[in-house]
Amino acid sequence: MRKITVIGTGYVGLVSGTCFAEVGNRVICCDVDQRKIDLLNSGVIPIYEPGLEEMALRNKSEGRLLFTTEVGEAIEASDIVYIAVGTPMSETGEADMRYVMSAAKKIGEHLNGHKIIVNKSTVPVGTGELVREVVQANKKYPWTSFDVVSNPEFLREGTALSDCMNMDRAIIGSDNAEAAEQIAQLHAPFNTRIFKTDLESAEMIKYAANTFLATKISFINAIANICEKVGADVEDVAKGMGMDSRIGEKFLQAGIGYGGSCFPKDTYALAHIADKSGYDFELLKSVIKTNHRQRFVVMDKLRETLGGLAGKQIAVLGLAFKPNTDDMREAPSLSIIPELLKQGAVVRAFDPIAAEAAKKQLPAEVAYLESAELAAAGCDACVILTEWNEVLTMDLAKVRDRMKQPIMIDGRNSFDPKVMEQHGFVYYSVGRRPVNRPETERKSVNL
């Protein structure tokens, strides 16, 4: 059993700390946010992640998982300290490092013996050395020693517990072989592949991996847009591409682009790192631009089908950036709904989990309904932005009968076009042929 402190009880810190406790370690999760710690100590998990509440509360009740605002005491009581604070995107696109530096300063002030300091936050290349300098400059006792390790996370929201307990790989960067080995042993229960490297390479791996996946998404979305123009089916195209072992089938699902806490922030951050290093990363800038434009393909289809949005009632199904999370960070709904309202539409929204989080960020004019069927009632069109199971399993016949016009714009390719045709919907998806398209629109497009 190792004594671990995790600084930061956000998504990464709370999931990682809970999983470390699950495999038998004593873990203290600490945060300066008193409200968040009070919630955790009262048994309320402030983020939504399937299975997290049960696992966290079980480990808390068995004494392996503790929550506190006493960050200094937590540092002193542990021999491994994880920094898992936020690195939000600044106005320039670079990662905001104030919380990482504050954590490093606090560690230095409470360094009461040798400790391994592990960066779990996504940070620019060179942060490990910067953390080393800050800790060294703030040491209370000159005789204390420490090592710095980079151990970036690769958790996917919605499947984070499974991702952690069955870890695909653990990247461990350090200039000290013994420290790297101790962190490798900490990951042994997760049955993962271990890759050891230097600090800088480990920090770059996180950015490189996420931006490569973002590139695959933007690429298939660009292909989808071409498929619509030439009459091809992007799902067949993606399947054929994915059969090539050099490409693989993952991250080739066409839609309205990526969102969330990682891909948008990490692509901008790497573009900034490249600029700062003197390299013009044109490819990555195009990926970012393509993703931004892709969000509005649903707007184009709505305007083409309805002939304008003023006075039209639009049901928006799904608000979170992906299913099984309440995370609204960079969710397409945050761009699309304000634009719908700006063009005069009335918006009726449904999301089974993220509605409360969405209310804090979306305009007050949005109405929130308790089901997809209720949201669609009386609407001129439905737009699917998140493929929640509650959306995938909605009663299509009931939805069609309640709508003013049976028009469905599917930004996530949630349904089989043949099924939608049988149910009598005018159905548009991404990179696939529309079904039951009005004759007048066909003629205008052909012209």
Image (cartoon, helix red, strand yellow):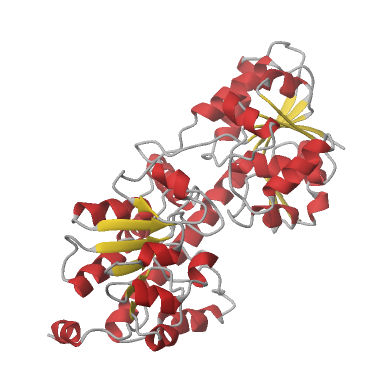
Residue at x 34%, y 59% (from the top left corner) = 286
**Is 313 positioned to the left or the right of 93 in the image?**
left
Q: Is 298 placed left or right of 217 in the picture? A: left
Position of residue 299 measured from the top left corner of the image (x, y, whole percent): 26, 64
- Residue occupying the far right of the picture: 1
Q: Nearer the viewer, residue 237 or 145?
A: 237
Residue 314 in the image: x percent, y percent?
29, 63
- For the question of whether residue 282 can be seen, the reply is no
Question: Image quadrant for the C terminus?
Answer: bottom left
- Does any portion of residue 327 appear in the rendered image? yes
Instruction: Using the image, determine if residue 389 lies above or below residue 337.
Output: below
What is the number of callouts on the image? 0
Q: Residue furthest left?
A: 447
Against 322, residue 254 (above or below) is below
| Left or right placement of residue 117 versus residue 282 in this view | right
Q: Looking at the rendering, in which quadrant would you find the N terminus?
A: top right
Figure check: 386 above or below 41 = below
Pick whichever, 214 or 164, lies toward us. 164
Q: Residue at x 69, y 18 (%)?
A: 72
As displayed, is residue 447 above or below residue 413? below
- Residue displayed at 72% across by 56% down: 167
The spot of residue 270 in percent (x, y) is 45, 47
Q: Residue at x 78, y 53 (%)?
A: 190
In the figure, is residue 336 to the left or right of 420? Answer: left
The quarter of the displayed image where residue 336 is located? bottom left
Residue 91 image offset from top left, x and y in percent: 35, 36
